[in-house]
Amino acid sequence: MSTETTASVSTHILDTSIGKPAEGVAISLSARTGLGGEWAALGGSATDVDGRCKDLPALPEGTTHVRLDFETETYFVSKHSSKKQAAEAQQDAPRVRDSGAFFPEVTITFAVNPGEHYHVPLLLNPFGYSVYRGS
C-alpha cells in the first residue's frame, strides 16, 4: 500500500524459456536511505503459482533505494532438471552449467520516490534475464 511518505514494491517473474510464471522463487527485499546508506534487510517472500509476489514487506519512510534479490538457482534446478537432460541429449543443444542456471541469483537495485508504487517484473531464462518498471 502506498502512502505519501513511502514507496511500495511488487514483482512477478515469467520464465521465458517455458512461457510460464516462475512459481516458488524466493525473493528478499532490502532498502537504504541515500547512496551511502547501509542496506537494511526487510524480509522476503516467494512467488505464487502466477509468478507474483504480492506480500513483500513495506518500505520504511525515507527509503531512496531498493534491492530485490531473486534466488533463481533453486528454481532452475527443481523446474528444469528433466528439460536439461532432454536438451543435453540433443547433439546441438547448448550446455547448461551443473547448477542448472548461468545466473544462480539476480539482484536488481533501483531508486524510489515517496508515494509511488514500483512494480518490477523479471523476465527470466537459464541464460539471461531482463527487468523493467511495470505498472
Image (cartoon, rainbow, N blue to C red):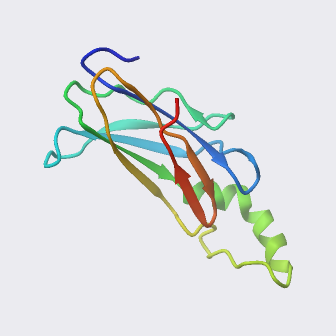
Q: Residue at x 28, y 22 (%)?
A: 6
Q: How far across and down, in percent of the image, does residue 92 sit?
A: 81, 83
Quarter where residue 81 is shown: bottom right
The image quadrant where one finds the N terminus is top left
Numbered marks: total:
0
134 or 62: nearer the viewer: 134
Decide if residue 83 is on the left or right side of residue 100: right
Residue 73, relative to residue 98: is it above or below?
above
Q: In the current view of this chain or complex, which residue is farthest to the bottom? A: 91
Quarter where residue 41 is shown: top left
Quarter where residue 32 is shown: top left
38 or 46: nearer the viewer: 38
Q: Residue at x 31, y 20 (%)?
A: 115
Decide if residue 36 is on the left or right side of residue 50: left
Residue 130, relative to residue 110: is it above or below?
below
Decide if residue 111 is on the left or right side of residue 14: left
111 or 103: nearer the viewer: 111
Q: Residue at x 73, y 60 (%)?
A: 80
Q: How far across and down, in percent of the image, does residue 76 sit?
A: 64, 59
Residue 125, relative to residue 2: is it above or below?
below
Decide if residue 105 is on the left or right side of residue 80: left
Q: How far across and down, in percent of the image, does residue 116 sit?
A: 36, 24
Q: Residue at x 80, y 64 (%)?
A: 82
Q: How far across and down, in percent of the image, does residue 79 sit?
A: 71, 55
